[in-house]
Amino acid sequence: MYIEKLYHFRRTVHRKITAGQQEELLRLTKSAQRSDAEQQELYANFDRAFLHLYPGFVRDFNELLQPGERYTLRSDELLNTEMRIYAFIRLGIDDTTKIAGFLHYSVNTIYTYRNKVKNKAIDREKFEQQVMKIGMV
Protein backbone atom coordinates (compact mmCIF):
# COMPACT_ATOMS: atom_id res chain seq x y z
CA MET A 1 0.00 0.00 0.00
CA TYR A 2 2.80 2.41 0.91
CA ILE A 3 4.79 1.51 -2.18
CA GLU A 4 1.72 2.24 -4.29
CA LYS A 5 1.26 5.62 -2.58
CA LEU A 6 4.92 6.44 -3.16
CA TYR A 7 4.61 5.46 -6.81
CA HIS A 8 1.51 7.65 -7.21
CA PHE A 9 3.25 10.58 -5.51
CA ARG A 10 6.30 10.18 -7.75
CA ARG A 11 4.07 10.17 -10.86
CA THR A 12 2.27 13.29 -9.64
CA VAL A 13 5.56 15.09 -9.02
CA HIS A 14 6.84 14.09 -12.46
CA ARG A 15 3.65 15.36 -14.16
CA LYS A 16 3.80 18.69 -12.35
CA ILE A 17 7.48 19.19 -13.21
CA THR A 18 6.81 18.34 -16.85
CA ALA A 19 3.83 20.74 -16.93
CA GLY A 20 5.87 23.53 -15.35
CA GLN A 21 3.64 23.65 -12.27
CA GLN A 22 6.39 24.46 -9.77
CA GLU A 23 4.10 26.46 -7.46
CA GLU A 24 1.63 23.58 -7.26
CA LEU A 25 4.50 21.16 -6.70
CA LEU A 26 5.90 23.35 -3.94
CA ARG A 27 2.49 23.49 -2.27
CA LEU A 28 2.09 19.73 -2.58
CA THR A 29 5.47 18.92 -1.08
CA LYS A 30 5.19 21.48 1.74
CA SER A 31 1.94 20.07 3.05
CA ALA A 32 2.60 18.71 6.53
CA GLN A 33 -1.07 17.78 6.86
CA ARG A 34 -0.77 15.02 4.26
CA SER A 35 2.43 13.74 5.82
CA ASP A 36 0.91 13.74 9.32
CA ALA A 37 -2.15 11.84 8.13
CA GLU A 38 0.00 9.22 6.40
CA GLN A 39 2.17 8.88 9.49
CA GLN A 40 -0.91 8.31 11.66
CA GLU A 41 -2.16 5.73 9.17
CA LEU A 42 1.20 3.96 9.28
CA TYR A 43 1.10 3.88 13.10
CA ALA A 44 -2.46 2.52 13.08
CA ASN A 45 -1.48 -0.20 10.60
CA PHE A 46 1.58 -1.08 12.68
CA ASP A 47 -0.54 -1.21 15.85
CA ARG A 48 -3.14 -3.48 14.24
CA ALA A 49 -0.51 -5.84 12.82
CA PHE A 50 1.41 -5.96 16.09
CA LEU A 51 -1.71 -6.59 18.18
CA HIS A 52 -2.71 -9.32 15.76
CA LEU A 53 0.57 -11.06 16.66
CA TYR A 54 0.38 -10.20 20.37
CA PRO A 55 -3.29 -9.65 21.24
CA GLY A 56 -2.66 -9.55 25.00
CA PHE A 57 0.22 -7.08 24.77
CA VAL A 58 -1.54 -4.08 26.33
CA ARG A 59 -2.78 -6.12 29.30
CA ASP A 60 0.52 -7.93 29.80
CA PHE A 61 2.54 -4.72 29.39
CA ASN A 62 0.42 -2.97 32.01
CA GLU A 63 0.89 -5.91 34.41
CA LEU A 64 4.62 -5.18 34.37
CA LEU A 65 3.94 -1.66 35.69
CA GLN A 66 3.15 -0.56 39.22
CA PRO A 67 -0.64 -0.49 39.72
CA GLY A 68 -0.89 3.32 39.87
CA GLU A 69 1.28 3.73 36.77
CA ARG A 70 -0.63 1.62 34.24
CA TYR A 71 -1.79 3.11 30.95
CA THR A 72 -5.38 3.67 29.96
CA LEU A 73 -5.67 4.05 26.22
CA ARG A 74 -7.98 6.58 24.60
CA SER A 75 -10.86 5.17 22.57
CA ASP A 76 -9.05 6.11 19.33
CA GLU A 77 -5.77 4.40 20.33
CA LEU A 78 -4.63 0.82 19.91
CA LEU A 79 -1.20 1.62 21.36
CA ASN A 80 0.19 4.86 22.74
CA THR A 81 3.71 6.09 22.01
CA GLU A 82 5.24 4.39 25.03
CA MET A 83 3.66 1.04 24.20
CA ARG A 84 4.59 1.40 20.53
CA ILE A 85 8.25 1.84 21.50
CA TYR A 86 8.07 -1.31 23.60
CA ALA A 87 6.23 -3.11 20.80
CA PHE A 88 9.36 -2.58 18.70
CA ILE A 89 11.45 -3.90 21.55
CA ARG A 90 9.15 -6.95 21.77
CA LEU A 91 9.75 -7.53 18.07
CA GLY A 92 13.49 -7.53 18.76
CA ILE A 93 14.18 -3.99 17.53
CA ASP A 94 15.84 -2.41 20.52
CA ASP A 95 18.12 -0.01 18.65
CA THR A 96 16.95 3.40 19.81
CA THR A 97 18.13 5.02 16.58
CA LYS A 98 15.98 2.69 14.46
CA ILE A 99 12.94 3.19 16.69
CA ALA A 100 13.44 6.97 16.57
CA GLY A 101 13.66 6.88 12.78
CA PHE A 102 10.45 4.92 12.38
CA LEU A 103 8.49 7.04 14.85
CA HIS A 104 10.02 10.33 13.64
CA TYR A 105 11.28 11.27 17.10
CA SER A 106 14.77 12.21 18.19
CA VAL A 107 16.98 9.58 19.76
CA ASN A 108 16.88 11.56 23.02
CA THR A 109 13.08 11.51 23.01
CA ILE A 110 13.06 7.71 22.66
CA TYR A 111 15.58 7.39 25.52
CA THR A 112 13.38 9.65 27.63
CA TYR A 113 10.25 7.59 26.92
CA ARG A 114 12.08 4.32 27.64
CA ASN A 115 13.39 5.59 30.97
CA LYS A 116 10.03 7.11 31.91
CA VAL A 117 8.33 3.75 31.39
CA LYS A 118 11.09 1.78 33.14
CA ASN A 119 10.67 4.04 36.17
CA LYS A 120 7.02 2.92 36.34
CA ALA A 121 7.95 -0.77 36.23
CA ILE A 122 7.57 -3.16 39.11
CA ASP A 123 11.08 -4.50 38.32
CA ARG A 124 13.00 -1.76 36.57
CA GLU A 125 16.12 -3.89 36.03
CA LYS A 126 14.33 -6.77 34.27
CA PHE A 127 11.58 -4.76 32.60
CA GLU A 128 12.80 -5.01 28.99
CA GLN A 129 13.56 -8.72 29.42
CA GLN A 130 10.00 -9.20 30.70
CA VAL A 131 8.61 -7.26 27.74
CA MET A 132 10.48 -9.65 25.44
CA LYS A 133 8.57 -12.55 27.03
CA ILE A 134 5.11 -11.10 26.38
CA GLY A 135 3.12 -13.49 24.20
CA MET A 136 5.49 -16.41 24.56
CA VAL A 137 3.84 -19.77 24.89
Image (spheres, rainbow, N blue to C red):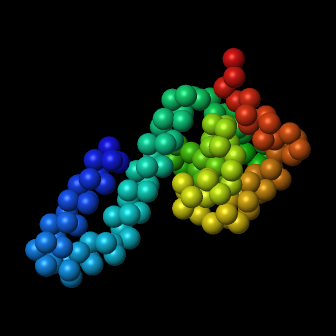
Q: Is residue 28 left or right of residue 62?
A: left
Q: Nearer the viewer, residue 27 or 59?
A: 27
Residue 12 visible from this viewpoint? yes
Q: Nearer the viewer, residue 120 or 112?
A: 112
Q: Position of residue 91 (x, y in %)?
A: 63, 37
Q: Position of residue 7 (x, y in %)?
A: 26, 53
Q: Quadrant of the C terminus?
A: top right
Considering every residue shown, the one lying at the far bottom of the view is: 23
Identify which residue is drawn at 61% across, 53% down: 98
Identify which residue is drawn at 31% across, 54% down: 6
Identify which residue is drawn at 81% across, 41% down: 127
- Which picture quadrant has residue 56? top right
Please, is residue 124 above or below residue 137 in the view? below
Residue 83 visible from this viewpoint? no
Considering every residue shown, the one lying at the far left of the view is: 19
Q: Is residue 91 left or right of residue 115?
A: left
Q: Position of residue 136 (x, y in %)?
A: 69, 22
Identify which residue is drawn at 70% across, 66% down: 108
Q: How many numbered tags mark residues here?
A: 0
Q: Is residue 73 left or right of residue 13?
A: right
- Which picture quadrant has residue 1? top left
Q: Position of residue 106 (x, y in %)?
A: 63, 66
